[in-house]
Amino acid sequence: MSDQIQQKDINNAAWAACDTFRGVMDAAGYKDYILVMLFLKYISDVWKDHYEEYQERYGDNDERIRRRLKNERFVLPEGSSFYDLYERRSEANVGELINIALEAIETENKEKLEDVFRNIDFNSEANLGKTRDRNRRLKMLLEDFNKPELNMSPSRVSEDVIGNTYIYLIERFASDAGKKAGEFYTPHKVSELVARLCAPEPGARICDPACGSAGLLIEAARLVGGKDYSLYGMEVNGSTWALARMNMFLHGADSARIEWCNTLTSPTLVENNQLIKFDNVVANPPFSLDKWGAEDADADPYNRFWRGVPPKSKGDYAFISHMIEAALEKEGRVAVVAPHGVLFRGAAEGRIRQQLIEENLLDAVIGLPGNLFPTTSIPVAILVFDRSREQGGVNRHRKDVLFVDASREYQAGKNQNTLLDEHLEKITAAYEKREDVDKYAHLATLEEIAENDFNLNIPRYVDTFEEEEEIDIDAVGREIDQLEKELSVVRGAMGKLLKGIDREGGLDRLFQSWTDEGDARIKT
């Protein structure tokens, strides 16, 4: 029998480990403990696998083995592996021991893992309960991850499988976390669609300025294939930033630069006091973010809001403005998920939208179904901007905008709708062809958009109205007359039969009552 671990087995075993925390805290809280333990178990298994390999080669020369191991992707300090902690799982200070091990791992791997575990405390009474309960839970957690199904040695499981399990857990946590899921999760198929519309190519520098747990960056990297790309991200939430760093590590993207900062008020993907420029900028930023920093936007050192300052209670165009300014002039592409309000709201947002259209930057507007996200049931849109449409760019002669109404294309679910591969194929095919498709897509000229006062509301451009079948009132009237005649004949025949049965007339009265009621229903 093969000892290769299957994707479903590792997924199920990792999800089962969550039982230790259910009822103690919600999924948004315990996800960090599970994902950190998965990460620790993975690097411990990789280290153990390589140690045994070198041991076979060099015997018991521990110093030589350690020197060789220092050339690996990471260093696991002595006494800090999962297996060291497992052996001490019954000790009274097991939570403190886990914290010490994680701190040691950070210290030895500063370039890749510095501060990644800062926001997770395995000795927290507030999260894990008083000492006795906390110790019991942590002991159970260590035992859950010591199961054979979670042996993640490279000889048994590929790096892709581990990365997929990490994403699988994040998806499950998002489903359980409800509205809190928006801080760290974008549905997989939405991420894939955004990546496909932005179309990164080999050699691309790809950035997500609101990267969450980095799922969208990973989808963009997969689309490129190979390793010829560089990934960048910014995330404001410290715990979510840590998830993104671990996610990059588990997917072999150790060199990804993921910054912990506020993109709108203090971006750190900066060189020589200017924004770093990217070939592709993708994001699913928070919808209509309140208090995003409008009060300081006029003095923005990177001049991102020169087209206008978005309203202080709605940060959608703040993110869009940042993304466009971070894209390479005359080359860069931007794909962003946004609420439909960005398509038609007026005032400052209307002026910014008009400016972007008049600059010929807007390439496409894709309307998606509602209820795709665990955080909201509202339908959303993907806006694609292409800086190669600027004067001097290869697509400078393109003077139109593609509108796609894919709002009716989804697989219905009990709690959440889902996009399927066939829906993504249809959307991307329409985007690439840039042709009118009846009740689905329309290629609008800039003049047409101007005639609509730069309102991008999709129904103005894609007519999805389905005409109802005409009702022939005269034919319906004739049919009713015929039914009444037939009823009259039946009523007469029934009356004669019943008179022969009931000489007292009781059934006649009952029948008459029944037929009157039936007659009234037919007329209605």
Image: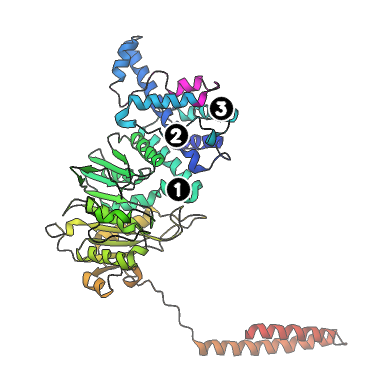
What is the span of residues highlighted in magenta in the rendered image? Answer: 71-95
As for residue 94 lying within the magenta part, the answer is: yes
Q: How is the image coloured?
A: rainbow
Mark nearer the N terminus (3 vs 2): 2
Mark nearer the N terminus (2 vs 1): 2
- Which amino acid type is shown beneath numbered disc 3? Asn
Give neighbour class at mark 2: few <14, some 14-19, many 20+ (Cα, 10 Å).
some
- Residue linked to disc 2: 120
Quadrant (top left, top right, bottom left, bottom right) of the C terminus? bottom right
Which secondary structure, mark 2?
A: loop
Look at discs 1 and 3 and give the one toward the viewer.
Answer: 3
- The percent coordinates of residue 202 (x first, y second) are 21, 43
Q: Distance between the residues labelled 1 and 3?
A: 28 Å
- The percent coordinates of residue 153 (x first, y second) are 40, 26
Which secondary structure, mark 1?
A: helix
The structure residue drawn at horizontal position 44% and vertical position 45%, both measured from the top left corner, is 171
- Residue linked to disc 3: 135
Look at discs 2 and 1 and give the one toward the viewer.
Answer: 2
Quarter residue 313 falls in: bottom left
- Residue linked to disc 1: 181
Which secondary structure, mark 3?
A: helix
- Give the mark count: 3
Q: In this view, does 238 lie to the left or right of 177?
A: left
